[in-house]
Amino acid sequence: MRLAFVALHRYVGLSLAVFLTLLGLTGSVLAFKEPLDEWLNPRLFRVASRGTARSPLDLAARLEEADPRARVTYVTLRSAPGLSAIFGIQPRIDPQTHHPFDLDYNQVFVDPMSGESLGRRYYGAMVVDRKHVIPWLYRLHSSMLLSERGSQWLLGIIAFVWLVHSCVGLYLTLPGASPFFRRWRRAWVVNKGSAFQMTFDVHRAAGSWFWALLIIMAMTGLGLRLAVPLVRPVLARLSPLTPLIFDRHVERPSDDPIEPVVLLADVIAPAEREAARRGWLDPASSSEYFPQFGIYSVRFHPPSDDDGQWGFGVPSLYFDATNGRLLGEKVPRAGTAADVVMDAQFPLHTGHIGGLAGRIVVSMTGLATATLAISGVMMWLRRTPLGKSPASRRLAPTA
């Protein structure tokens, strides 16, 4: 039985090795995605001017006037001192072709005091330069550069197989004889010896020390990629699950968006009054329009809070863009047990739930994931006819 699990662990690990190496290395970098992006592109994210900020809605209107092909769908309502205002862009429909205009950008950075455009880029473009490298790494990590549907199932299946694979790996570290804990202690240390012995020890020790974190990464990866088709239906059988706001609306195709009747300017004030009524203390700091659903979201968080990426997230209100009606709210850590589990997927996977310490832990887990994959391949290569050695043959039954 143990030899069967060894073979299963070996060949499943080999099939996952490339994916886990890429996911681990990119994930270790993306744990610090926002500060790294800002460090690489200070001209986009930082401003020297100080004073009273201009109306972000006026700035958004100026952007649309400058390029009638563009629709501003994301607005930074309040910027922290020294930081630019970020505007998200989606193309409007070309009346000649009835398809979206072909824009070469989807983000614009603006000095909130002077109104000067600091630059723009296409977030997720297949370009590896200073401006695009972090968004490109994010796209690589979250989709393997595939389509949304293709990457959803590929990465979801990888996460599930990785989860089972990690459990088999833990089992293989357990000694089959007594004294149990004295023998098991060997799985947690790296001893001096041959190159194969040290590679084996690194592989086993990394898996032992990071096992719980690897399980969390695999489970949350599964939860993020297969949330709608798999995870939410399963959770709903265990605990009531609050439907998402977008579940109640039919998604329109990208070439048939809903034109808003109510402008964002007419939504902000009612949103702030509603937030005050609910006792939310943070200001309205960002808003987004979803053309395929005809819905505005208004989020409430401190401007310096990485756009609400820390912790479990931030509270949001949703409004109908056709009549201004309040559609509902999303409050992190509120609702049923299943709601809290779903809310925890992203902050656990990225480390935001633990602030700086959480990001460091996730980054180290990414490096451990890549180390496990690479060391596993190295051990397998030593077992091939060209790489076999007496040491590798001795360790083969327990590797």
Image: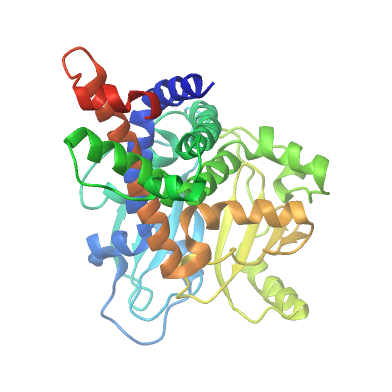
Q: Quadrant of residue 323?
A: bottom right
Question: Taking 133 as reference, is 77 left or right?
Answer: right
Residue located farthest toward the bottom when viewing the structure as drawn:
51
Of 295 and 184, nearer the camera is 184
Residue 120 shows up from this direction: yes
Note whether 283 is above or below 216 in the view shown: below
Residue 124 shows up from this direction: no
Q: Across the whole image, how many numbered discs are drawn on residues?
A: 0
Identity of the residue drawn at 73% across and 62% down: 329
Where is residue 163? Give x, y as percent.
54, 36
Where is residue 147? Give x, y as percent.
46, 29
Of 186 and 42, nearer the camera is 186
Where is residue 379? Give x, y as percent.
27, 28
Note whether 43 is above or below 237 in the view shown: below
Residue located farthest toward the top when viewing the structure as drawn:
385
Identity of the residue drawn at 25% across and 19% down: 383
Question: Taking 369 as reference, is 242 left or right?
Answer: right
Where is residue 132? Give x, y as percent.
28, 48
Identity of the residue drawn at 50% across and 24% down: 2
Note whether 315 is above or below 157 in the view shown: below
Q: How is the image coloured?
A: rainbow
Q: Quadrant of residue 39?
A: bottom left
Of 369 and 399, nearer the camera is 399
Question: Taking 103 as reference, is 346 left or right?
Answer: right
Quadrant of the image for the C terminus? top left
Quadrant of the image for the N terminus? top right
